[in-house]
Amino acid sequence: MRILFIGDIFASTGRRLVAEHLPFIRDNEQIDFVIANAENAAGGFGLTPPLAQDLFDLGIDVLTSGNHIWDKREIYDYLDKQPRLLRPANYPADMNGRGVVVVDSRKGVRVAVLNLQGRTYMPSTDCPFRKADELLKSIEGVKVIFVDFHAEVTSEKIAMGWHLDGRVSAMVGTHTHIPTADSRILPHGTAYQTDCGMTGPYDGVIGVEKEPVIRKFMTALPVRFEAARGMAELHAVIVDVEEATGRALAIKRYTVKQNGN
């Protein structure tokens, strides 16, 4: 089977890219299951229930997230109502939502999606490595497993890849909004890429207008961030998985570039 994972959807530009290109990608690449990180879909900061539903209506099977999922309070109750919208599993257990879901693909194959968050330069959470071990025990019997590891530093993401090698079908990193060129199959059959990259505006600084960011770096004063305009890019990975074993057979980066407004 083929899994498409779309990197951090950022603001209206990212949502537009997905709406315009997902039908073609799904048909042309014969995609069986679609996952996307949507924690920045609402103006670059957080997600709202209507926008989440819009993304599901486009044909996305599971939405993952990260630290920005908590930016819009109206999403909290929705996290409890919609199991296909995940928040990182290693937040405290009594918080809204969950970090793992099992969904049937279009081919009838059960697919587990896990969402974890790193701890280095990130909000304080439980250990993602131990939480991954715990979650994998809870979904024994599911062969096809995809992990979105939302983390800041490359070393933590690479370490998680090695930790999960042979136990999940794929582990792809998110959060830095910069795609990495290290997609590969690890020795025991796990597809890996340190960061998928962002789906949104690239004429800025990781999605926001560049001038306020430069001013903040130069003055250390607070500034107001707004989503950038201009050139837009969709970044994703496509993973081929052997259904019977859950081993990854191939991983490739998929990019769409277009002029923005």
Image: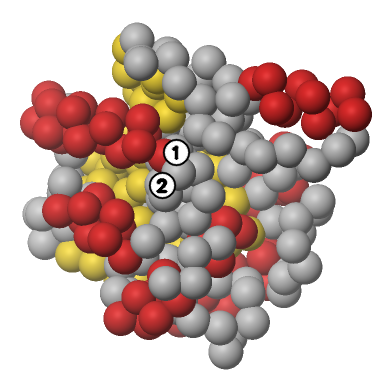
Q: Residue at left 31%, top 38%?
A: 15
Residue 140 falls left or right of residue 212: left
Residue 4 falls left or right of residue 20: right
Using the image as rendered, state which of residue 222 and residue 151 is in the foreground: 222
Q: Residue at left 51%, top 20%?
A: 202
Q: Quadrant of residue 113?
A: bottom left
Q: CA distance from mark 1 to mark 2?
A: 5 Å
Judge whether 76 appears above or below 17 on screen.
Answer: below
Using the image as rendered, state which of residue 206 and residue 182 is in the foreground: 206
Q: Residue furthest right?
A: 219
Q: Residue at left 42%, top 49%?
A: 42
Q: Secondary structure at mark 1?
A: loop
Picture coordinates of residue 189, whole percent (x, y): 47, 44
The residue that label 2 is drawn on is: 41
Query: Can residue 105 be seen at all in this image of the molecule?
Result: yes
Q: Residue at left 32%, top 49%?
A: 35
Judge whether 209 appears above or below 56 on screen.
Answer: above
Disc number for residue 10: 1
Disc number for residue 18: none
Picture coordinates of residue 138, whole percent (x, y): 45, 81
Crowdedness of circle 2 by 10 Å Cα count: few (<14), some, many (20+)? many
Q: Residue furthest bottom?
A: 94
Contact between labelled residues 2 and 1, with CB atoms less than 8 Å apart: yes
Using the image as rendered, state which of residue 234 and residue 214 is in the foreground: 214
Disc 1 residue type? Phe
Upstream in the sequence, badge 1 or badge 2?
1
Crowdedness of circle 1 by 10 Å Cα count: few (<14), some, many (20+)? many
Which quarter of the figure is the N terminus placed in?
A: top left
Q: Quadrant of residue 76?
A: bottom left
